[in-house]
Amino acid sequence: MAYHVMAPYVGESLPEMVLRKIVAETLSFPIPLVRVTDEIFSLELFHGPTLAFKDVGARFMSRCLGHFALQEKREVTVLVATSGDTGGAVAHGFHHVEGVNVVILYPSGKVSPVQEKQLTALGGNIHALEVMGSFDDCQRMVKEAFADPTLTRQLFLTSANSINVARWLPQQLYYILAWQQWKESAAPAISVPSGNFGNICAGLMAWKSGLPVDHFIAACNRNDVVPRFLKGEPYQPKPSHATLSNAMDVGDPSNFVRILEIFGQEQPLLKKMLSSQSILDSETEETIGFVFRDSGYTLDPHGAVGFLALERFLQKNPGKKGFFLETAHPLKFPDSVERITGRSIQFPDQVKALMEGTKNSTVMDTRYELLREFLLQVGQA
């Protein structure tokens, strides 16, 4: 299934057997659709090596780039900004890949302890930059690097953020895997925790290609640029706010322009298929608590935002059913989840070893010139 979904995008860039091997390795862990209530299901995307949905895209991209790097005469530098899970998935996917250096920017103090260890404890060809600012600062610095012709002439730069189609397009696959498991009579409503909007954009691409979907809900936290826009206000990016669902703390989502293009800039068509809700931290905490008490299911903060946005949609549309994307393991947010549920979270084996590793990061302020200097040092080492 995954081969046939990805083959039209790959064309002749990869031999068939290489692509088949890549998609097999990409989907080498389970992605179950689990019933939480009579109307709501959870698509669990946290069973991969770094316990987050970005394992799918990062594993696909790393294997593609590893294949291409073997054919290049110079090293590749992968440059990525992360608000939480992207960095860990990319770091794990590219660790020890020959001919590839990875530079990851993350906002200091704004990722969870597990997320930070996944970024900083691997070493080798993985370089972590701890930026004294927000995710939007990290993303801006990355964009400046790609727009700097004096830098790109000296380094073979590519991105592993969802601005890179090799990271983003494979995210369609788990929507199709969910449909494979969907046993209800009508097409589902799908609620997607949304920050940079790459995840829901991939879902919309799958729908555009024929996947049966009733409606998409972009579930946002306090960072509500898109919910405001879909309610009729001007699209106005603004500084991000820190929340419990930190991977969604984005005030200027890069992938929303792609969503507008999918709908041909026709806002009435967009608003018919996509709605959006903003969920506050207090509501996120309440949702984690009542879902655990009522069903025994443990949500992470991002999944809780997705659950509540879907529940509100279904309340307004009785008779419909749907699923939300549970994008990260609750273990990544132990302080809030354990406090709310009153239960400790068990560490999977792959995380136990990582947490014993040593943090190794380079602290940097938000000046682009410092990033440029670091990239040149890594590229010439």
Image (cartoon, helix red, strand yellow):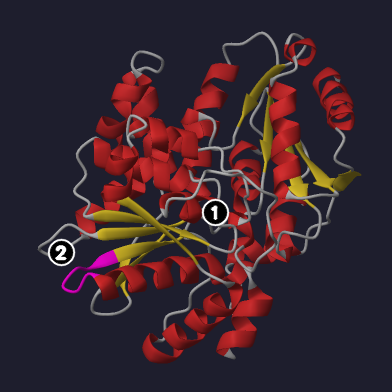
Residue found 26% across the figure and 60% down from its top = 189
Labelled disc at residue 338: none
Answer left or right for 44 relative to 118.
Answer: left
| Residue 49 disc label | 1
Q: Earlier in the sequence, mark 2 or mark 1?
A: 1
Residue found at the far front of this picture? 233
Residue 60 in view of the camera: no
Measure how far apart labels 2 and 1 are at the Cα level: 28 Å
Quarter of the rendering containing residue 332: bottom right
Residue 297 or residue 253, whichever sits in front: 253
Q: Choose between 318 and 34: the one closer to the eye.
A: 318
Q: Which amino acid is tagged 1? A: Pro
Q: Does 292 appear above or below 132? A: below
User: Which quarter shows the N terminus?
Assistant: top left
Front: mark 2 or 1: 2
Secondary structure found at label 2: loop
The vertical placement of 211 against 331, above or below, is: above
Part of the protein shown in magenta: 317-322
The residue at the far left in this view is 185
x, y percent for residue 346: 58, 77
